[in-house]
Image (spheres, grey):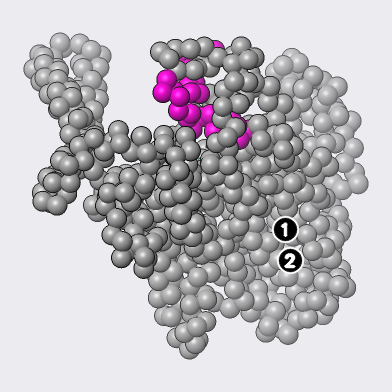
């Protein structure tokens, strides 16, 4: 049983007598910030007082009078201007703890109305190696799917691989013009990666050459405007001058940003210009940008050679990506990539056309939407379909085929506009009953506060990141436990290294950017996986020292005793695991589970300092404390497991 949702449901019927929709008021029932105010606090009397023109204390008294909580709350008190403080009955807490001991799911109730979710995450473009940006989608999506399943929903994970786009046009072009046959024979994955990068370089070169004149003109224009602004005499009016300085600052920032962009374009140009081989190739392949598009189009139109090459490349590309998933311990129910939908795309367009939702604009077929200036293009003038068209076919499939009640898209926030339009078109099209949610996330930043890049400006490869996290973890464990065999060190390093990396990502609010920092993610103190894994290992140490028989304890629980305050506090935290899971699912934010596990571990550390298990004084208190230890370890293990992170019996 989940105390918070039980309290809310009891209040819900009472509040409904006062307002039509009590949702907002129910959100004001929360865990108490300080144990001296009890375990939970309901603050809804304040806004109600205002609305109903009565004193909040009066309202609070009325609510307390009507709500029935006696069976599990010890006291219901009104405090201050009208706070309602609730304290759980110790007996009730103990009863829940006992149920949790006995139950493999820690007595977390399953949802009353299970739904089918399709969770779209990871979804890399397979023709290029995975990079740092793919961590977020992969670990956040995995954690959300795990939590959904744990609470009883049906969560179908689907890796929407980008296996049909321009990247394939690029490697096909590369294969036809730049292939090193011997390298392809011995290490095809590496050679395809090289071809991708090579073609990318030439494309970027030509694009940069084309963009530079305009970018430079723009920079000169901005500089002239700045010079004018700077030369203007101060007016003497304070407000006006402040405004003036602000404008200068804004413009200077813009100039710096622009200069940086030009620098990066110049880098791309110079790299090719200064390498004789590349330079002559760029001249011979001056039409490469267009040519790559043509190769892609030929593939889509069923050109035999290109189709064959695509079929040949795809398994290699997937092999490489699969290796990453193995290292991360990630599995998908489905991997229906973009190519899976390509035969449906014409139907999507003709169906939307037949229903009258499309308009032609400049030869392209578009869906115009109320809340967006630009329409969603679903077929280009040359007949090509787009990313959006595939996504529409995908929504149709997920809802028709999987009976999805909800489709979640764990994708970079930079695609927000795409998803807003996509969902609007899907609603028009008749798929409005399902929940469609873009679970967006921010960027992984480097130590300089900018998107994490290598020194040469490339995105940071995922394989290298995992290697580095593991090798740092290896060094830490070797130093900490010099006596362990090296094989064991390696196992520990994987759990700590990969776990630390995942947790660093998951513990940040997904909406924000976060800084990638190995030292922080592997620190033993603070809100890190290592700290939680350490707390877990500490419990295992206690269980070993006291030679506790965990199975027997679990099968035959004894009475719990709260001798010291901290024991009760730890107990209340333990029974709140289900609330943390609920919180994760409100906005699909795994960081709530991280926070919960961190706070639980902190309370456990206090318990560990204050409460001796071995010398508890009485056999019954010792058992009660052991039971709290067992529950703490199981909660941490289960919680970390849902986040895709492992634990160790000894660290
Ligand atoms: N492959 C895309 C990319 O790398 C992400 C796909 C996300 N999922 C989707 N259904 N659009 O940007």
Highlighted range, magenta: 369-395
Q: Secondary structure at mark 2?
A: helix
- 153 w.r.t. 212: above or below: below
**Which of 83/651 is in front?**
651
Q: Is mark 2 within 8 Å of ligand 1?
A: no
Q: Which residue is mark 2?
A: 631
- 222 w.r.t. 270: above or below: above
Q: Quadrant of the C terminus?
A: bottom right
Residue 388, given in percent of the width and then of the height, sits at: 51, 29
**What residue sits 60% from the left and 69% below the top?**
647
Q: Which residue is mark 1?
A: 574
Q: Secondary structure at mark 1?
A: helix
**What residue sits 48% from the left and 38% below the top?**
302
**What residue sits 19% from the left and 27% below the top?**
215
**What residue sits 20% from the left and 11% below the top?**
237
Circle 1/circle 2 CB separation < 8 Å: yes
């Amino acid at each position: 049983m989940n105390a918070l949702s039980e309290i809310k449901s009891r209040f819900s019927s009472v509040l409904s007598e006062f307002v039509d929709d009590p949702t907002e008021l129910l959100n004001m029932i929360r865990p108490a910030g300080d144990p001296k105010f009890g375990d939970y606090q309901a603050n809804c009397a304040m806004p109600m007082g205002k609305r109903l023109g009565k004193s909040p204390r009066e309202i609070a008294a009325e609510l307390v009078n009507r709500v029935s909580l006696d069976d599990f709350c010890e006291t219901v008190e009104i405090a201050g201007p009208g706070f309602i403080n609730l304290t759980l009955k110790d007996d009730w807490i103990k009863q829940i703890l006992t149920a949790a001991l006995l139950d493999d799911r820690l007595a977390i109730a399953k949802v009353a109305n299970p739904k089918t979710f399709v969770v779209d995450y990871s979804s890399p473009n397979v023709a290029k190696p995975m990079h740092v940006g793919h961590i977020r989608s992969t670990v956040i999506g995995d954690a959300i799917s795990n939590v959904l399943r744990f609470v009883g929903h049906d969560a179908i994970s689907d890796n929407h691989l980008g296996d049909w786009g321009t990247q394939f046009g690029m490697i096909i072009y590369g294969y036809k013009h730049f292939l090193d046959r011997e390298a392809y024979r011995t290490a095809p994955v590496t050679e395809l990666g090289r071809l991708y990068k090579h073609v990318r370089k030439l494309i970027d070169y030509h694009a940069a050459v084309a963009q530079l004149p305009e970018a430079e003109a723009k920079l000169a224009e901005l500089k002239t405007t700045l010079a004018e602004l700077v030369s203007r005499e101060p007016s003497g009016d304070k407000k006006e001058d402040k405004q003036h300085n602000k404008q200068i600052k804004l413009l200077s920032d813009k100039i710096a940003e622009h200069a940086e962009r030009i620098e990066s374009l110049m880098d791309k140009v110079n790299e090719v210009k200064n390498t004789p081989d590349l330079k002559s190739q760029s001249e011979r392949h001056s039409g490469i940008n267009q040519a790559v598009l043509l190769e892609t189009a030929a593939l889509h139109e069923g050109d035999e050679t290109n189709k064959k090459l695509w079929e040949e490349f795809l398994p290699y590309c997937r092999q490489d990506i699969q290796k990453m998933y193995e290292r991360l311990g990630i599995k998908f129910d489905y991997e229906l990539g973009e190519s899976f939908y390509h035969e449906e795309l014409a139907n999507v367009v003709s169906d939307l056309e037949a229903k009258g939702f499309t308009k032609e604009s400049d030869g392209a077929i578009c869906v115009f939407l109320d809340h967006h200036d630009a329409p969603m293009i679903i077929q280009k003038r040359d007949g090509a379909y787009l990313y959006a068209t595939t996504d529409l076919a995908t929504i149709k499939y997920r809802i028709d085929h999987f009976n999805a009640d909800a489709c979640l898209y764990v994708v970079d926030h930079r695609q927000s506009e795409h998803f807003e339009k996509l969902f609007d078109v899907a609603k028009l099209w008749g798929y409005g009953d399902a929940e469609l949610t873009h679970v967006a996330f921010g960027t992984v930043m480097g130590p300089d506060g900018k998107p994490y890049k290598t020194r040469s400006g490339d995105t940071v490869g995922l394989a290298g990141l995992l290697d580095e996290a593991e090798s740092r973890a290896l060094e830490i464990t070797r130093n900490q436990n010099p006596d362990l065999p090296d094989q064991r060190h390696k196992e520990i390093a994987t759990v700590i290294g990969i776990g630390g990396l995942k947790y660093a990502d998951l513990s940040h609010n997904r909406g924000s950017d976060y800084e990638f920092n190995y030292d922080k993610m592997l620190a033993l103190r603070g809100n890190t996986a290592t700290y939680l894994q350490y707390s877990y290992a500490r419990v295992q140490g206690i269980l070993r020292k006291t030679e506790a028989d965990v199975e027997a304890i679990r099968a035959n629980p004894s009475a719990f005793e709260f001798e010291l305050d901290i024991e009760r506090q730890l107990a209340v935290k333990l029974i709140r695991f289900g609330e943390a899971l609920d919180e994760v699912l409100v906005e699909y934010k795994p960081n709530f589970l991280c926070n919960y596990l961190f706070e639980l571990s902190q309370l456990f550390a206090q318990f560990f300092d204050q409460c001796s298990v071995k010398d508890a004084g009485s056999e019954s208190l010792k058992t009660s404390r052991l039971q709290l230890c067992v529950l703490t370890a199981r909660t941490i293990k289960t919680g970390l497991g849902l986040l895709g992170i492992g634990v160790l019996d000894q660290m």
